[in-house]
Structures are given as structure tokens and as C-alpha cells.
Image (tube, helix red, strand yellow):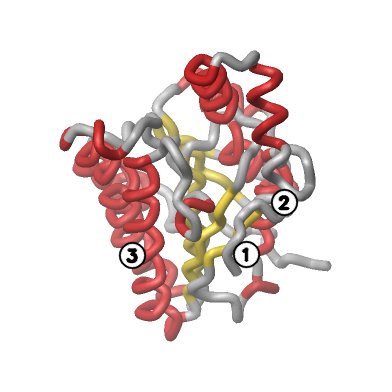
Amino acid sequence: MNLELNNKYALVCGSTAGIGKATAIALANEGTILTLIARNEEKLKATIEGLPQQHKHNFIVADFSNPDELEEKISTFIKQNHGFHILINNTGGPPGGPIFDATLEEFEHAFTQHLKCNHVLVQTLVPFMKEQGFGRIINVISTSVKQPLDGLGVSNTIRGAVANWSKTLANELGQFGITVNNVLPGATATERLSQIIKNKASKTGQSVEEASDAMKNTVPAKRFAQPEETADAITFLASERASYINGINLPVDGGRTKSL
């Protein structure tokens, strides 16, 4: 299947590790011209060097705790270079813990990193997408959008807000050839999952291996996803072939989510 992504411009957030990095590689393999964005310049450079080099890829160093600075950097890049056909919103999840114990600062920080920065990026990138008559906005969220996850109180709350923001945006932008979709990863073999498993083992008295196996047993597939499997779903949604898929929440979770 020809995804028709060659020479499309994509901005990939959180692209130096995990699902974000796997998505950058998958898009680059399809001929997409990438701009990566993350906080660590050295990791960004290393990721760029590992991409297929049929195009010249760029990066932007930015911290998602500062929406104003993010908007300034993206706007400057667009003025000096080009706009983007594709936006992959992907930011590391908030720390775990019961929602009752969460502080207001934790909610505010997560809201800024996830919803406010997503919104800044969309407002900055959509004018170019409208001009092109083509746009893909894909938000990497969590299956907690469909089924809240124990011990992830702040994450459950903020992810739900992002999902509703996204659905509303899909309704508004569909007329311009711009689709807005959410990909909901389940348990995926990333550094974040490793930390969640270690925390669970510490609280339950299980070994890390026992805690890992218990989590795998909640998945019909009886294993964790690889980041590349989620990246493949994101890449398809970014393509011309997905032009009539809009406003959905797509779990990539091996069947773990119990709701339809």
C-alpha cells in the first residue's frame, strides 16, 4: 500500500525515545521530511543521525512546560523553513499515584504539558494545513480515555480532557481536509512502563518479574506492545489512505481495554 507520505512535512513531539522515536523512524521510512522536537539536544541529534537520510531532517529544542516559548520557537521555524502537513502530539505521561493525593500543581503542570501545548501547536500549524487542503493531527494519549487506569489519577483526568479537545477539533477542521485522531497505547515496552512496573512491585512486595507478568496477564495477547507497533498505526493515520478516518480513539493495546 502506498501511503503517499513522500515529501510531506511532519512535526513529531517527544521523538527521542519510545513511541515518539519509533514514529519518527516509521514516517522517515515512508519518505516524510521530519522535524523532531524534545528537550534534549544531544538526544535529538542522535535520533536524527539514525533516521533514513533520503531527506534532510531538522529538530527543535523546546520544553513543554513553557507554552509561550514553544509557540515562539515553532513560529520562528515555520517563518524560516516551512509549515507542516502532519503533527504528532506526544508527551510523556504525568507521574502515577491516587487522584486523591494529587496536588493542584500536578494537575496544572500536566494540563500545560498536554492540552495547552497541544493547542499552541495546532493553532500555529493549522493555517499551513488549510492552505494545502491536507492535514493530519494525531494525539498519542492512553487507553485511560476509555477505561481509567488504577494509580494514574492525574493522567486519567488530563488524558480525558485531551480526548474531548481532540474530538471537538476534529468536528471543526474536517471540512478543510484535516483529520484529528487519537492513538491510545496500552502497555508498551518503554521506559515509562518499566518505571510503572517497578513502582507496582515496590508497593505490592512482588518482584519486578512477577509484577510484569501480572500486567501481561491482563492483556489477551499476553505480552506488551513494541513501540513500533503503535508507530505503524500512527503512520497509517497520517497517510492519504486514512483521509476518511476522523475523530476516533484507536486503542493499540492487544485487546486489554474492556469497553467497545
The x and y percentages for residue 163 are: 40, 61
What is the three-letter code of the residue carrying label 1?
Leu
The picture quadrant where one finds residue 92 is top left
Question: Residue 15, position in %: x, y?
Answer: 53, 36
The earlier-in-sequence mark between 1 and 2 is 1
Element type where label 2 sits in the image = loop
Compared to residue 252, the image places residue 178 above or below, namely below
Real-space Cα separation, disc 1 to disc 2, in angstroms: 18 Å
Residue 139 at least partly seen: yes
Kind of residue sitting beneath label 2 = Gly
Residue located at (62% from left, 64% from top): 237
Few, some or many residues within 10 Å of mark 2 (<14, 14–19, 20+) = some
Furthest toward the left, the residue is 104
Q: Mark 3 and 1 residues: CB-CB less than 8 Å, in contact?
A: no
Which mark sits nearer the N-terminus, 2 or 3? 3
Q: Is residue 19 above or below residue 252?
A: above
Find numbered disc 3 in the image and state the secondary structure of the residue it sits on.
Answer: helix
**Circle 1 SS class:** helix
- As drawn, the label of residue 59 is none
Q: Nearer the viewer, mark 2 or mark 3?
A: 2
Question: Which of the 4 image quadrants contains residue 198?
Answer: top right
Q: Which residue is mark 3?
A: 165
The residue to which callout 1 is attached is 237
Which residue corresponds to mark 2?
254
| Mark pair 2, 3: CA separation | 26 Å
Within 10 angstroms of label 3, few (less than 14), some, or many (20 or more) residues?
A: some
